Image (cartoon, rainbow, N blue to C red):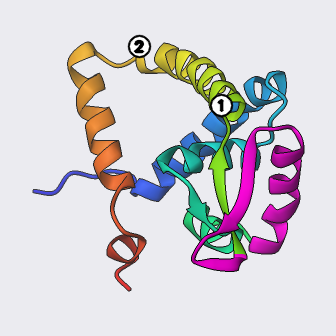
Amino acid sequence: MTTHRRDLAAMIAPLGRALMAAEQPILAAHGLSMWAYVVLLALDDGPARGQGVLAQEIGADKTRIIAVLDDLQERGLIERTPDPTDRRARVLALTPKGRRLRDATQADIQAREDRLLAKLPAADRLGFLNALATLADLPRDEITGD
């Protein structure tokens, strides 16, 4: 006997939109756009080799991300240095100021998320986060079947 459940996208998409809406006032309080925050999070993994590579990694249009990177650089949150292996390219990295802002923003976002997660029984909370992390880490082609 099969049990009826909603499709994953039907559950996750509205939840994702609501979570992003909940993040907006926090991002605004920290002076960040959603894309700027995504860039700061992505650079936590270490320097990125070029804005095209970064745009691809975060799913952004590379022409659209230039203004975001310019703003972050002007504010001293990221730095762009010549790539030693390709002088035409730039390596993008967080500055200490960028890391502090990213950490403060993430702490405020996760504090709000913790209030939402508290609606789950404690035993389910860790399982939910682990399952979500596992699915989020899957390569896109494994999800889409490409």
- Which percent across, then down, holds residue 143? 36, 70
Up the image or down, 60 lies above or below 88; here it is above
Q: How many marks?
A: 2
Q: Which residue is mark 1?
A: 96
Range drawn in magenta: 62-88
In the rendered image, the vertical position of residue 47 relative to residue 37, given as above or below: below
Residue, disc 2: 118
Which is more N-terminal, label 1 or label 2?
1
Q: Amino acid at mark 2?
A: Ala
Q: Residue furthest left?
A: 1
Q: Disc 2 vs disc 1: Cβ atoms closer than 8 Å?
A: no
Q: Secondary structure at mark 2?
A: loop
Question: Which residue is found at the position 47% from the left and 57% from the top?
Answer: 9
Q: Quadrant of residue 132?
A: top left
Question: Residue at image x 53%, y 43%?
Answer: 44
In the image, 83 versus 104, the foreground residue is: 83
- In this rendered view, identify the residue nearer to me: 115 or 111: 111
> Residue lying farthest front?
84
| Quadrant where the C terminus is found in the figure | bottom left
**Residue 22: image x %, image y %?**
69, 28
Where residue 20 appears, x then y in whole percent?
67, 39
